[in-house]
Amino acid sequence: MTFIIKNKDVRESDYTNLQFKPRPSHADLGAYFKYGKFYNFHGGGHQSGRLTALLVVLGSIAKQILAKRNIITVSHIYKIMNLIDDPLNPKELDQTQVNKLLNESFPVINDTVKLQMIDFILQTKNQSDSVGGIIETVIYNVPTGLGEPFFDSIESFLSHLIFSIPGIKGIEFGEGFNIANLYGSQANDEYRLENGKITTSTFHNGGIVGGISIGLPIIFKTAIKPTSSIGKTQKTIDLLTQSETEITIQGRHDPAFISRISIVINAVTNYAILELLAQKEGLLWIK
């Protein structure tokens, strides 16, 4: 299958003065030295977030296939600065909540927090600045035994894909970095039976142990950096003259792209689970 998505709203003039002046925290500097004259600096070139459109196509196909197994991935904007949304419930899939999040362009569970987040982003935009945040993702109805340790554990395979999305700076599964602050007696997820099925009392390990799924929902959070293109004047280097200079970035830039990335995270997650499922069970069940 071939998919072509044409960008019909291009403004190359926004980037003409940036060819030899790398934008702070963009891929410009590394790409300039890696690709030389072949680097297309307009809009970030092949480091642009626009390329994730094809990941969404791939993930949408995977999502439809996973529906045959009732495997559902859902994400929401968990945190922007000090504004924190309600967490997803890993113990029980709330289909109404899932449908709401999957169909919203700004997926937040708590409507009051959602309005506060949007207002904060608009305030940040008026200050010619940007913000990042944290996205929480839960994968429901994951079968037991997915993951191919050593190098294709669920964590490593998912992380590999998610770090391919521009703007991602961190990922943690379950309790993540905070698990280092717990005693073993606190961090261990004790097993128990519930309606004849194995489950755990807590979800500190995010539904993954030893790189393999244990039949519980998988939980992870992703850290999104603030949009690098901001309206404030910033210091950089003129690569032609090898001198320090300043730039003010023009053009159309989001004060926060976290809501767009949540869609891409869902997409690559669906692909990752389908790929791991195919490695374990093959593809005959898809027919």
Image (tube, rainbow, N blue to C red):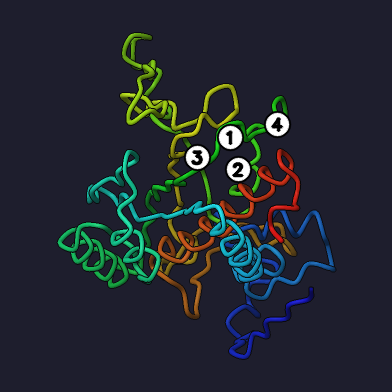
Query: x%, y% of residue 46?
Result: 72, 66
Label 4 SS: loop
Labels 2 & 3 near each other (Cβ < 8 A): yes
* Type of amino acid at the residue the image marks with label 4: Glu
| Residue at 46% in and 74% down | 253
Front residue (pair 136, 143): 143
Query: Which residue is under mark 1?
Result: 155
Mark closer to the observer (3, 4):
4
Residue furthest left as drawn: 112
* Type of amino acid at the residue the image marks with label 1: Glu
Label 3 SS: strand
Q: Is residue 125 above or below residue 178?
A: below
Q: Indicate which disc, 1 or 4, sits on the residue closer to the N terminus.
A: 4
Query: Which residue is under mark 3?
Result: 171
Query: x%, y% of residue 78?
Result: 32, 50
Total tally of numbered discs in the picture:
4
Query: Which residue is under mark 4?
Result: 148
| Residue at 58% in and 65% down | 64
